[in-house]
Amino acid sequence: MNWTDERVELLKKLWSEGLSASQIAAELGGVTRNAVIGKVHRLGLSGRAKAVAAPAPRPRKPRPSAPTAVPARPAVHGNAALATVVRAVAEPEPEEVADPVANVIPMADRCTILDLTEFTCRWPVGDPGKQDFFYCGSRTKTGLPYCAYHARIAYQPVQDRRRDRRAVR
């Protein structure tokens, strides 16, 4: 198929009107959607009319922690004499553990890729590009590449994964 001047002009017109490549291909006839995209790219066409998109959903604000009742000084007058003031009390942030892996993988079991055997856990820990990268190295479960702890993480039943995903939403 040759791109004649008339077809190129029609392509430019339809592109500027905001038609999709598939719609333009159907209008021109004898040309595929990919051929239209290629020609548009070679011609350097841009600035086409865009359809008005629906507004993006607003991001949800995180829910505050459950408010706790803090007794206030009783009011002397009116219907609020016995009321308690409810204020949200921020929960303290848990302290981060310096090395969370230290509680799980003993130093003696940690190994490099050169130390791995069929009986050592192959769970990678850390960034492979860093000096402190290592493999778990604990004794594997029979028939698995991981120790019991990492096998529980790696192999989760399908129903549990689906349940966890629903809880996150």
Image (spheres, rainbow, N blue to C red):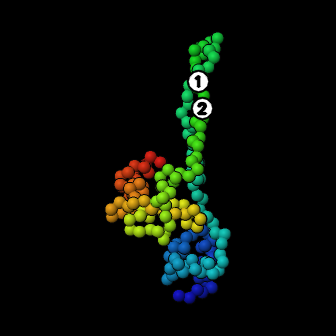
In this picture, residue 65 sits left or right of residue 167: right
- Which residue appears at 44% of the width and 51% of the height? 165
Determine the secondary structure under disc 1.
strand
Label 1 neighbour load within 10 Å: few <14, some 14-19, many 20+:
few
| Identity, as a three-letter code, of the amino acid under mark 2 | Val
Q: Identify which amino acid the numbered label 1 is placed on.
A: Val
Residue that numbered label 1 is attached to: 70
Residue, far top: 77
How many residues crowd around disc 2 within 10 Å: few (fewer than 14), some, or many (20 or more)? few
Is there any visible trace of residue 8 in the rendered image? yes
Identify which residue, 90 or 165, lies in the foreground. Answer: 90
Residue 124 visible (yes or no)? no
Check whether the beta carbons of the residues at disc 2 and disc 1 lie within 8 A of each other.
yes
> Along the polypeptide, which appears first: circle 2 or circle 1?
1
Q: Position of residue 10 (x, y in %)?
A: 60, 78
Q: Quickly name the residue at label 2.
A: 89
Identify whether 152 is placed above or below 130.
above
